[in-house]
Image (cartoon, rainbow, N blue to C red):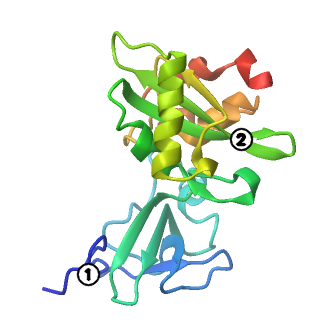
Amino acid sequence: MGPVYSSELQCRGLGMKVEAYDEQGNPVIGHKGELVCTLSAPSMPIYFWNDPDNIKYRQAYFDIYPGVWQHGDYIEITENGGVIIYGRSDATLNPGGVRIGTAEIYRQVESIPEIMDSLVVGQDWDSDVRIVLFVKLRQGSQLTDELIERIKITIRKNSTPRHVPAKIFAVEDIPYTISGKKVELAVRNVIHGLEVKNKDALANPEALDNYLDLPELQS
């Protein structure tokens, strides 16, 4: 029954000790931070299947702030007591040292009719990070120079020039977890030649083959 403010959830869930933490693990108000839950709650899973020593479970939620559940999302708790959701915190890019949430790019790209789905990652390049965008096109569409330019213009117009990808590729599939989340970190590891751990959590692990050994990423 609380007041409603534009773009905000009215309040934190009842029974949930939710905070927004800064990088030092301090709760903050009025600033974007990590969504954490500092006390146990009835809806929390207590273990993963086939993880008898709770190694995967702890890596998933308790590695960043020991003893505190870190959910992997950015939120802001406002002065009103409301909450603004910004998207995944493990899905951030840092070109030129500027932190960019991948959700900011997805909102623009997936508004383009030819694009069915997309995935964006940061590639280490020339002592910095450059943004690489992969798009899954609708049947009958092609990634032409005109479409690439339209993608860039849409992103630049509705966000900032920093959000514009340096490289754009068409792929046949986008990898997702079994719970329906895009797996940007796995793709980032693939394009950097690193091991992808916990493939068992992927609904379509074969999709990662789309990102192997792309010569265009070497220039």
Residue under numbered circle 1: 14
Task: State the residue in front, 42 or 143.
Answer: 143
When the figure is inspected, residue 207 is found, relative to residue 96, above or below; the finding is: above
Q: Residue at x 40, y 84 (%)?
A: 78
Q: Residue at x 57, y 22 (%)?
A: 169
The image shows a total of numbered marks equal to 2
Q: Residue at x 63, y 80 (%)?
A: 25
Q: Secondary structure at mark 1?
A: loop
Indicate the position of residue 32 as horizontal and vertical percent values. 52, 73
Q: Is residue 175 visible?
A: no
Residue under numbered circle 2: 130
Q: Place residue 44 in its image quadrant.
A: bottom left
Which image quarter is the C terminus in? Answer: top right
Mark 2–mark 1 Cα distance, whole angstroms, equals 41 Å
Mark 2–mark 1 contact, CB under 8 Å?
no
Task: State the residue in front, 67 or 147.
Answer: 147
Indicate the position of residue 95 as horizontal and vertical percent values. 71, 50
Circle 2 Cα neighbour tier, 10 Å, few/some/many (<14 / 14–19 / ≥20): many
Q: Residue at x 38, y 14 (%)?
A: 141
Task: State the residue in front, 102 or 26.
Answer: 102
**Left or right of residue 148, residue 181 in this image:** left
Q: Residue placed farthest to the bottom in the image? A: 79
Q: What is the three-letter code of the residue carrying label 2?
A: Arg
When the figure is inspected, residue 2 is found, relative to residue 99, above or below; the finding is: below
- The numbered mark, 2 or 1, whose residue comes first in the sequence reads 1
Q: Secondary structure at mark 2?
A: strand
When the figure is inspected, residue 43 is found, relative to residue 96, above or below; the finding is: below
